[in-house]
Image: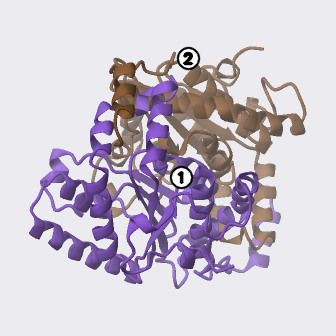
Chain colours: A purple, B brown
Amino acid sequence: MAPISELLRLAPGTRLAEVDPHGKPGFDGAKSAGKRALPAMGTELADLSEKLFAEAYTGADRAGRRVLLVLQGMDTSGKGGVVSHTVGLLGPESVHLTSFKKPTEEELAHDFLWRVEKELPERGTVGIFDRSHYEDVLVARVHRLVDAAEIERRYDAINDFERRIAESGTAVVKCMLHISPEEQRKRLLARLDEPTKQWKFKPGDVDERRLWPAYQQAYELALERCNTDVAPWYVVPSDRKWYRNWAIGMLLLETLRGMGLSWPAPDYDVAAQRARLQDRAL
Amino acid sequence: MAPISELLRLAPGTRLAEVDPHGKPGFDGAKSAGKRALPAMGTELADLSEKLFAEAYTGADRAGRRVLLVLQGMDTSGKGGVVSHTVGLLGPESVHLTSFKKPTEEELAHDFLWRVEKELPERGTVGIFDRSHYEDVLVARVHRLVDAAEIERRYDAINDFERRIAESGTAVVKCMLHISPEEQRKRLLARLDEPTKQWKFKPGDVDERRLWPAYQQAYELALERCNTDVAPWYVVPSDRKWYRNWAIGMLLLETLRGMGLSWPAPDYDVAAQRARLQDRAL
């Protein structure tokens, strides 16, 4: 089977409406198998993320490397679920998670990339953006928070920014969690029906939902304009939660495997250190 | 059985040498049972940490609350293991992990608590300090980086600081991971023998090890001076990894249970929102 990174890579000119939110490209099996396949990736994901960390820790040649996973999607598309189920498989010490909220006054007093730059992962780590700088071309476009020229400037600024971080050693993986409006309705209703989930619901979610077509258009434009080879967009069918979790796990796995990571060789004499440890009480 | 927070709480005047690093207070069973007991806590830990997050998210009355877990201990005592095995049981979105390294020049140009303040957990979250401001009275004392009067000033500053964060809603849990020098030797040798662990070893670890008695004394003084009711110290026997992971899980569990967390009630009309979601296509 082709790698997930090929199967989910957004092809130029793709309409989001053409991508089946209920699909499961690259997974040939049922839900139960999909749910089992995810934790089965855990050992390798933990191992590779620890190698990435080790490489930076010991200051080897390529020690500037890191990964940035960007998660975008409509409300209820499952960004939080991916964080819990997939990101949780990486070694916690190598994960740097940032949930971008509505910008603060201080953040708004700077360029939109200011707060993003500050949250970029350190070398050796995997940064996770739950929402990101893309909000500034999505929400900003739909709600006309800025004019069209500023949106255009931002697409270019994002491409420059992502090229810079890629060139300085960051593997950028951007995932759009693609759900259908029917699935969103089900999930919002489930939040209303379940006392442990009611806190996740805000009446404003329904207002945003009514802007669905405008958001889909804003996504299409943003994904099209910022779908570069160094920072590609993947559209992840997300009506099936288990597939979404599995697919993003596979994208991380393929990314980390592609980095050619290995345990750093010791830069000290192992036998001499062993002798030092054994030669006296302390 | 008494709560772990009683059993491990450092009693005034305790000599560290009197605490058995191989003990397992509060756990009546063998290793296999201890290893099983940890993931069994996972559901409740994830549930409680999500409630803590929900409370802050919805801006309820007591929404300023948070938890800070401080992990201190000699090299190989298992701070990283606790992060992987125990902290990993909390919901990743509610965890904020900081690993304090050797201070940078910028950090040294400020008071020692400057970098610590910046990493305090946001409301609704659980902050984890892998090393902490205690390094500034431990390493600083053993290596005489500052004079005795400055160390004294720092004890007082720490107590003031911890009282302030406790009074503004932070449950502070400080754990000293207590191992024997024999166990450390075994673990350092294991790092040397295992190619996947050699990167964790530095020759300087052996130099630090030879300062064991000085470190134990520095720990005793720091723990004694900064063992307040609002920010107590727990000494966690850590020669057995499974016990250490379990005991710190229990400390977190008891702390979160003691906060009386509950799912926030909705501040909107559930039926009205359900109707809005159902009344048209979007």
Q: Are marks 1 and 2 on the same chain?
A: no
In the image shown, does B220 or B72 lie closer to the viewer?
B72
Callout 1: few (<14), some (14-19), or many (20+) C-alpha neighbours within 10 Å? many
Q: What residue would you read off at disc 2? A: B258
**Amino acid type shown at disc 1:** Asp
Q: What residue would you read off at disc 1? A: A239
Q: CA distance from mark 1 to mark 2?
A: 38 Å
* Residue B105: x %, y % from top left: 33, 63
**What secondary structure is found at the residue carrying circle 1?**
loop
Q: Residue at x 51, y 83 (%)?
A: A62
Asked whether the viewer can see residue B225, the reply is no
Q: Report the chain holding disc 2.
A: B
* Residue A197: x %, y % from top left: 49, 30
In the image shown, does A261 or B186 lie closer to the viewer?
A261
* Residue B131: x %, y % from top left: 52, 47
Callout 2: few (<14), some (14-19), or many (20+) C-alpha neighbours within 10 Å? few
Asked whether the viewer can see residue A275, the reply is yes
Q: Residue at x 58, y 30 (%)?
A: B47
Which quadrant of the figure has residue B159?
top left
Which quadrant of the figure has residue B19?
top right
**Amino acid type shown at disc 2:** Gly
In the image shown, does B190 or B122 lie closer to the viewer?
B122
Whether tag 1 and tag 2 are in contact, CB under 8 A, the answer is no
Q: Report the chain holding disc 1.
A: A
Q: Which part of the image, by quadrant, shows the N terminus of chain A?
A: bottom right
Q: Relative to A2, is A14 on the left or the right?
A: left
* Residue A115: x %, y % from top left: 26, 57
